[in-house]
Amino acid sequence: MALIAVGPIAHARSFLFRAGAFVALALLLVVASLISPTFATPTNLLNVLRQMAITGVIGIGMTMVILTGGIDLSVGSIVALVSVLVAGFQGHGTVVVVFLGLLSATVVGAINGAGVVIGRLQPFIMTLGMMTVTRGLAFMYSGGKPMEILLPGLDAVGSRAILSIPIPGLVFAVLLVLGGWLLTAVPFGRYLYAIGSHEEAARLSGVKVGMQLLAVYTLCGLLSGVAGVLFAAQQSVGMALAGTGYELNAIAAVVLGGTSLFGGEGSVWGTAAGAAIIAILGNIMNLSGINPFTQDFLKGIIIVFAVVLQRSFSR
């Protein structure tokens, strides 16, 4: 009889591990609507979508990195670097500055990948170093001062909507679909899961682990660059302090979405749910007048609690 009882329990734990973020999101939507009548208004919900776009875009790349058993702490600094470069080169037009911003972010991501693959550095150490280097470059270029951005084309991206949906939200939705496709429909995604599950077994199976890791860190850098462009478009300012704590938000979204920090299990769809949870929590705390510093404290508690639950369900 004991053996028969194990099956349903295991299935329930597996379901909670995979779908817990969506269940939590549904419950949070109900609770948030009860706490504040303002929350469920179309204007506020679209504002939540706009707020979660940047975390969601970064979270897509972070999910792929964490699936391999790695991590990228430089994503927030990349946002800062891209924002000041956009501000500094805005005289060349929207297309040029967007290209330059994405190129610089991709280069930082490639350096992260090279350090992990060629330098054989731990991802935590390599990306921690690049986090400092990249933000240092942003401070050097901007002189530590905010730089105003006056680009009508870029401003339209941050402030306008298509079919009533904010453009940043549409950008996130498109990248989310592409990210889901990459992880499920092409060998690249299957290789990431294989590396995270057992790197040596993946290598013995013929997977070019080094090339895959280089590619995934480069892609994470590129997506962080997209987030940097969205930040510049929404805030109309470039500053070296931009993106502070974004790596925390992205990791929180990934963990809340059910991706294992040990690699090999997770999805970008779960990360999207995690990003929505974080955005809604922030929105509700703002509507309730909770101090921003307290909000950071609560986010940290949520991450720790999510990891504990995750390890419990994975066992």
Image (spheres, rainbow, N blue to C red):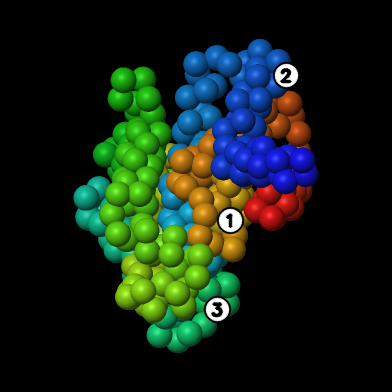
* Disc 2 residue type (three-letter): Ile
Image-based side of 204 in relation to 252, left or right: left
In this rendering, the label closer to the viewer, 2 or 1: 1
The quarter of the displayed image where residue 282 is located:
top right
Q: Badge 1 local density, few (<14 within 10 Å), some, or many (20+)? A: many
User: Label 3 belongs to which residue?
Assistant: 122
**Residue 279 in view (yes/no):** no
Residue at figure coordinates x 57%, y 42% from the top left: 18
Point out the tag, 3 or 2, that comes first from the N-terminus. Answer: 2
Q: In this view, does 162 lie above or below 184?
A: above
Point out the tag, 3 or 1, that comes first from the N-terminus. Answer: 3
In this rendering, the label closer to the viewer, 3 or 1: 1
Task: Name the element at disc 2.
Answer: helix
Task: Name the element at disc 1.
Answer: loop
Q: How far apart are marks 2 and 1 (CA)?
A: 32 Å
Point out the tag, 2 or 1, that comes first from the N-terminus. Answer: 2
Image-based side of 4 in relation to 279, left or right: right
Q: In this view, does 39 lie above or below 135?
A: above
Residue at figure coordinates x 49%, y 65% from the top left: 196
Q: In this view, does 286 lie above or below 236?
A: above
Please state the horizontal and vertical placement of residue 201, each as a whole percent of the image. 45, 74
**Residue 182 in view (yes/no):** yes
User: Label 2 belongs to which residue?
Assistant: 35
* Disc 3 residue type (three-letter): Gln
Residue at figure coordinates x 70%, y 21% from the top left: 31
The quarter of the displayed image where residue 118 is located:
bottom left
* Viewer-closest of 131 and 304: 304
Q: Distance between the residues labelled 3 and 2?
A: 44 Å
Please state the horizontal and vertical placement of residue 34, each as a whole percent of the image. 70, 15
The C terminus lies in which quarter of the figure? Answer: bottom right
User: Label 1 belongs to which residue?
Assistant: 260
